[in-house]
Amino acid sequence: MRESWQRRFAEAPDVLLEARRRRTIVPVRNLAVGGDDFVTMAGPCSVESEHQLMATAYCVRDAGARILRGGAFKPRSSPYSFQGLGLEGLKLLAKAREETDLAIVTEVMSECDVPLVAEYTDILQIGSRNMENYALLEAAARSGRPILLKRGMMATIADLFRSAQVILANGNPNVILCERGIRTFETAMRNTFDAAGIVLLKQVTHLPVIADPSHAAGFRELVPALARTGIAAGADGLLVEVHPDPDKAWSDGEQSLDFAGFAGMMAGLEPWIALRGAALREEKLEQPDSTNRRLAEVMA
Ligand code: PEP
Ligand code: MN
């Protein structure tokens, strides 16, 4: 690895690919995140009701998602917005898992809630606003659950690595990084999707990387193209917001796909995911750039 990166990321030595030589594959129920399989996590921004969650769970499963997402504790931009159903939301997620056999990912916002949320979920999500909450990271790490660590909206890659290092240093090797867009001078979209960041993460770390095109874009029309971009950049999976009636969603409706939109996106991603699989088999997970080369060959 380039010496300048070694210097830049010196405070997160265990995160770097060199430290392990092998890529981390995170076991989640009967799945492996970061291995050969491309893993899509999808579901509503917030758990709103049993009907909303169950309908969405069946839709995303039938379209190919393997993990159901849904917030029970919501960090909202406005303090007056819906804050989540809390325990009732966790119970609905557990019910959805039982009925559909999908694994669950949900956010934990406070270190006090870690034991409760960990009891219900397969993956603990640390949200963008909490990426540098080290007390929360330590508590989440010690729960032993895999952790989906979302990049802070104003965090550099070095900041993201320091947070991942906190989790690894607290004895939890199962960290999944998530690029969800960062704040830049551009305001046309909710955030700026750092596709180059995904390329870099895959080159310098051994951790799985998930792309979240929904929070990156802020608008559903952009989500399928950003999902394809994420795959081409080397992501191991996606995190996508889906709602039965996005215009009536209690949070993040504008960026949520409806059922037909999600199924259409997933069908359209199939050739991209197949190319990724072929590239990985050929290069034994070492060079995400090979996906792009293969795409270029196909397009030529
Ligand atoms: C979410 O996943 O719904 C969420 C709140 O994400 P972020 O922390 O990336 O804003
Ligand atoms: Mn959301």
Image: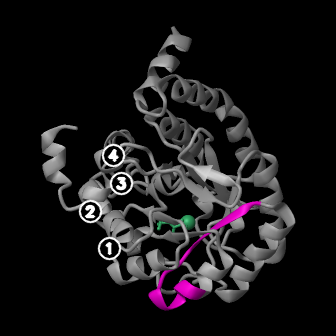
Q: Is residue 210 magenta?
A: no
Structural crowding at the residue carrying mark 1, measured as other residues with C-alpha within 10 Å and reported as few (<14), some (14–19) or many (≥20):
many
N-terminal label among 3 and 1: 1
Q: Nearer the viewer, residue 212 or 216?
A: 212
Percent x, y of residue 270:
68, 31
Judge whether 70 appears above or below 198 on screen: below
Mark 2–mark 1 distance (CA, rounded to whole Å): 8 Å
Residue 77 visible at all: no
Identify residue type, mark 4. Leu
Residue 112 painted magenta: yes
Q: Is residue 73 left or right of residue 5?
A: right
The disc label shown at residue 187, or none: 3
Q: Secondary structure at mark 2?
A: helix
The residue type indicated by label 1 comes to Glu
- The residue carrying mark 4 is 17
Ligand 1 within 8 A of label 3's CB? no
* Residue at (52% x, 37% y) in the render: 231
| Label 2 close to label 1 by CB (< 8 Å) | yes
Q: Secondary structure at mark 3?
A: loop
Extent of the magenta region: 102-115
- The mark closer to the camera, 2 or 4, is 4
